[in-house]
Amino acid sequence: MARRRASDLFVECLEAEGVKYVFGIPGEETLDLNESLANSSVAFVPVRHEQGGAYMADMYGRLTGRAGVCLGTLGPGATNLVTAVADAFLDRAPLVALTGQGDLERTHKESHQYIDLVGMMRPITKWNAGLTSPEVIPEVVRKAFKVAESEKPGATHIELPEDVMAAGVDAAPLQRRRPVEPEPGARELLKAADLIRNAINPVALAGNGVVRAGASPALREFMRATGIPVAETFMGKGVVDYQDHQALGTVGLQSRDYAMAGFEDADVVIAIGYDLVEHAPQHWNDRRDKKIVVIDSVAAEIDAYFTPEVELIGDIYHVLSRLAEECRDAPHSGGSTRLRDVILSRFEAAKDDDHFPAQPPRVLWELRHALGRQDILISDVGLHKLWIGRMFPAHEPSTVLIANGLAGMGFAVPSAIAAKLVHPERKVVTVNGDGGFLMNCQELETAVRLKTPIVNVIWENCQYGSIVWKQDKKFGRHFGTDFANPDFVGLAESFGMPAWRCGGIDEFAERLRHALTLDLPSVIVVPIDYSLDVAISEELGTETVAT
């Protein structure tokens, strides 16, 4: 075998993993890696901030199930990756972060730009390691991807010392293997089926795991076979069609959500792909009186309010299909749709609301009617995220994408670029607050350069709206939340894209439909009025989740 640079071998390992893109910013300590990438089938996508590149890798992983890859150099390049790497970690998105590092000979002492990157990444990755010699590259790369993509998926990290990547090596990539998934035993399956058949008021709670497993068809068949209604978490939106009469809506924003969706009266709760990082089970099992059946890819987290009677661990699609067959002979009659009815009635009434600055339900109504069933809406983090999570209806999974584990602002714009690369045939729209938009708006240049026609909608109110909402509720006033904005239209145009500021809600609808026909990215600014409480109804109780 011919001897070559370690960086060449590293990139060959990326190719063996099927990597299509590396999102990032090159640095002095990654010169060899970037030269090897330039001679490979892997497309290096330069971004304008490492956080933007990591969010792109995060979204690529969410939508494909294959680890997205991001790159930063040592020191500040690596620290800039942290927020988005942590987002992938908590939102269960497969991601492999690559960081440069100084020569091994200077890691024992104070050195320019040197920090312990492996130590820094340890709390926000499933696994991470530094390359200590060129010979270990095939094993390290294979492990990073295997761990990142295995359930529950998340972030891993590889540190690339400059001298190691420049050294010569004789080695070859390891063969990629699909992660092995367990199967529940017959005893557990029959026990779960018995619990469900004998339940008086069963209800299901579906989360992000159903999306990752591609198990929405199996869940919908389970609903039909058993008659058991399904509520969704924010990240589970679309696993059941909101128009299905057994769909209970999206729960988790307020204390009465679960009660109005039938959880208060439920004796059995079937938690399907449910992640506790989204919503604490105390909110739906505060009396600890529910019998819980867990269907998931890994064993349940320990929580005093989440003690399963039985756990069915394995491929969620397959488990649901088997359970549907076992329970088909004892169908239930469904549950309470009060929550869904309250939300959807307000949503439908919004089409006649001509108030301007616009109120959130009307803007969401226009967005829903401009997008098809498979088109994608990506929410940034802020008060608008609560409106989208609460009210925006979804027909299919992976069409309403929300960061809800770490919930970091600046998520939407870079994520939309990756979504368009994965699904160029779909329309992709972001909804941003004017606070979060400025946190990664530099990636508009990346969108223009890549010719990814995403439509970025900015809800402008010159405040950190979610904090205003919470401060007003707690203190009767708000402070430290007001700011001025740049000319967003001029800013967008300076990047070479069309942009509009709407003077009325009808103009927004017109601009939106036009922007969705363009072959380049665009920005639409909508003055927003948040005086309408996101809670919509006092009947739903106090809020229970952060933005």
Image (cartoon, helix red, strand yellow):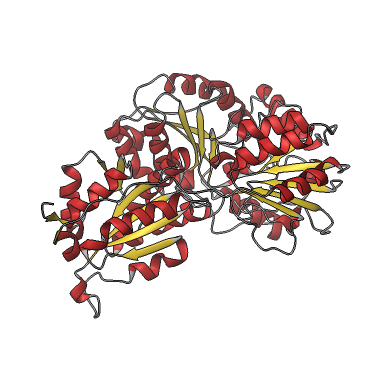
Residue 183 percent coordinates (x, y): 61, 48
Q: Is residue 112 visible?
A: yes
Q: In the image, what residue occupies the spot 29% across and 35% down?
A: 494
**Number of marks in the rendered image:** 0
Q: Is residue 466 left or right of residue 113?
A: right
In the rendered image, the vertical position of residue 217 relative to residue 315, given as above or below: above
Residue 357 percent coordinates (x, y): 58, 33
In the rendered image, the vertical position of residue 424 relative to residue 234, given as above or below: above
Q: Is residue 381 left or right of residue 387?
A: left
- In the depicted view, which residue is nearer to us: 501 or 73? 73
Q: Residue furthest bottom?
A: 109
Q: Is residue 359 visible?
A: no
Q: In the image, what residue occupies the spot 85% across and 48% down?
A: 267
The quarter of the displayed image where residue 194 is located: top right
- In the depicted view, which residue is nearer to us: 321 or 419? 321
Residue 327 percent coordinates (x, y): 78, 36
Q: Is residue 461 left or right of residue 173?
A: right
- In the depicted view, which residue is nearer to us: 454 or 60? 60
In the rendered image, the vertical position of residue 149 relative to residue 242, given as above or below: below
Residue 336 percent coordinates (x, y): 83, 36
The quarter of the displayed image where residue 227 is located: top right
Q: Is residue 520 left or right of residue 516?
A: left
